[in-house]
Image (cartoon, grey):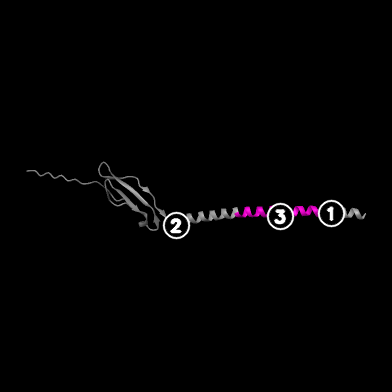
């Protein structure tokens, strides 16, 4: 009398990096916030290979919170500088144009009156 035992084992992907052991056909999801001050998610699929489960390439990324804050601050500073330069150029152009026009006319009138007064005395 012979006993034959058949066992079926579902394949699985072994833990690798931040991804835990995952059964074949499932997608492992890693929340970056578990790593500390990071935001985002990473996903990695476990597919059936020749012998056991094999990991696919990971998708998504983890972004440090500090980098996001620095990026926002840099954008705000750039916008503030552009607005300041635009306001400065438009304000100074109007003021200079008005002053030049008025002073130029008054200077011409006074210059023409003086020579005529000297000619009458001689």
Q: Please name the residue that numbered disc 2 is placed on.
A: 66
Identify which residue is drawn at 88% across, 55% down: 117
Q: Nearer the viewer, residue 106 or 10?
A: 106
Q: Neighbour class for label 3 at 10 Å: few (<14), some, many (≥20)? A: few
Kindly report which numbered mark, 2 or 1, lies closer to the viewer in this rendering: 1
Residue 93: give x, y in percent of width and height. 66, 52
Percent across and percent down for residue 48 are 27, 43
Answer few, some or many: residues within 10 Å of disc 1's Cα (few below 14, many 20 plus, some between 14 and 19): few
- Residue under the point 78% across and 54% down: 107
Residue 82, percent from left and from top: 57, 53
Q: Left of 88 or right of it: where is 108?
A: right
**Is 97 colored magenta in this rendering?**
yes
Local SS, label 1: helix
The quarter holding residue 4 reads top left
**CA distance separating discs 3 and 2:** 50 Å
N-terminal label among 2 and 1: 2
Quadrant containing the N terminus in the rendered view: top left
Q: Which residues are magenta?
A: 87-113
Where is mark 3, residue-wise? 99
Quarter of the rendering containing residue 66: bottom left
């Amino acid at each position: 009398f012979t006993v034959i035992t058949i066992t079926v084992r579902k394949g699985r992907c072994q833990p690798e990096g931040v991804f835990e052991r995952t059964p074949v056909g499932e997608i492992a999801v890693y929340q970056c916030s578990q790593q500390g001050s990071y935001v985002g998610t990473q996903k990695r699929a476990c597919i059936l290979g020749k012998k056991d489960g094999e990991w696919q390439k990971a998708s998504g990324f983890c972004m440090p919170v500090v980098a996001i804050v620095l990026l926002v601050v840099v954008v705000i500073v750039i916008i503030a500088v552009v607005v300041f330069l635009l306001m400065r150029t438009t304000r100074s152009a109007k003021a200079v144009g008005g002053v030049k026009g008025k002073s130029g006319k008054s200077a011409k009138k006074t210059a023409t009156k003086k020579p005529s007064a000297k000619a009458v005395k001689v």
